[in-house]
Image (spheres, rainbow, N blue to C red):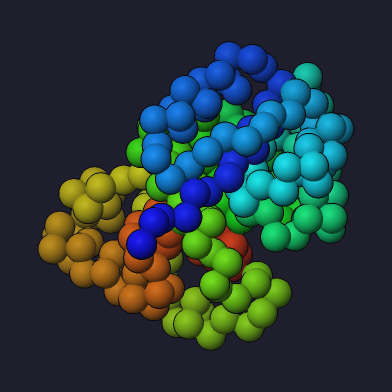
Amino acid sequence: MKTKTIRVLIADDTLIAREGWKTILETVEDIKVIGEATTAHETPKRVREFQPDVLLMDLKWFDDESAGAAAIAQIKRESPQTRIVAITAYPHLTADARRAGAEAALPKGFSKLELVDMIRAVHELESFPSPAAPVQVADELSDREREVLILLARGLTDKEIASELFIAESTAKNHVANILGKLDAANRTQAVAIGFQRGILKGESS
């Protein structure tokens, strides 16, 4: 069976960022860049025009720190089916983006693998409950598992998580496995995306 192609729209105010993201994604078989937006104001229009599966959205536009979140809120009202990955170099903007409706966030400086995995993860969120729906499973995460999920959002490995929390690496691996099971996530990146979607994470990854 042929894998469905994920249609991606890129929105950033700098050419170098847009070209950089395109260069990364052009090498991925199941992802296709279908368009670009060069201002926050035009992004909702581009989303209506192209109907992307996933939008990569910068948050700070020409020194306006509120432009990205405002555009995300409008997009979610008009095109709620589009999944949004907020991308920023400014950690304090991530929480507003998530409240506006972004499914996930990535700090600028991400690797190719992190970007591709996040796009795939948020695209797969179609089958999961919306943030407004009651999610008893997420509430069952222990305090330690929430700590581990935050560290996963920061991109730490099992060994690094163990060092950060002063626990054995095998214990860290068990916590990760429990998190994946409770969130019904296929992998770490999807667990992080679900964490943002359900409000368990509040911007820790940026």
- Residue 80 sits above or below residue 47 on the image: below
Picture quadrant of residue 66: top right
Q: Is residue 92 above or below residue 172?
A: above
Question: How many labels were placed on the picture?
Answer: 0
Image quadrant in which you'd find residue 154: top left
Residue occupying the point 29% across, 65% down: 176
| Residue reaching furthest to the front | 1
Q: Residue at x 35, y 38 (%)?
A: 113
Farthest-out residue, top: 16
Q: Residue placed at 51% from the left, 20% from the top?
A: 20
Tell me if residue 37 comes above or below residue 137 in the rendering.
above
Query: Nearest the camera: 3 or 74?
Result: 3
- Name the one closer to the observer, 64 or 14: 14
Residue 170 percent coordinates (x, y): 13, 63
Left of 2 or right of it: where is 106?
right
Quadrant (top left, top right, bottom left, bottom right) of the N terminus: bottom left
Question: Does residue 87 appear to the left or right of 101 in the view shown?
Answer: left
- Report if residue 154 is visible in the image: no
Q: Is residue 15 left or right of residue 60?
A: left
Residue 172 pos. (x, y %): 22, 61
- Residue 2 visible, this orientation: yes
Q: Which residue is located at x 40 percent, y 74 percent?
A: 184
Where does residue 112 sit, x and y in percent of width and height? Answer: 38, 33
In this rendering, is residue 158 above or below 20?
below
Q: Position of residue 37 (x, y in %)?
A: 74, 29
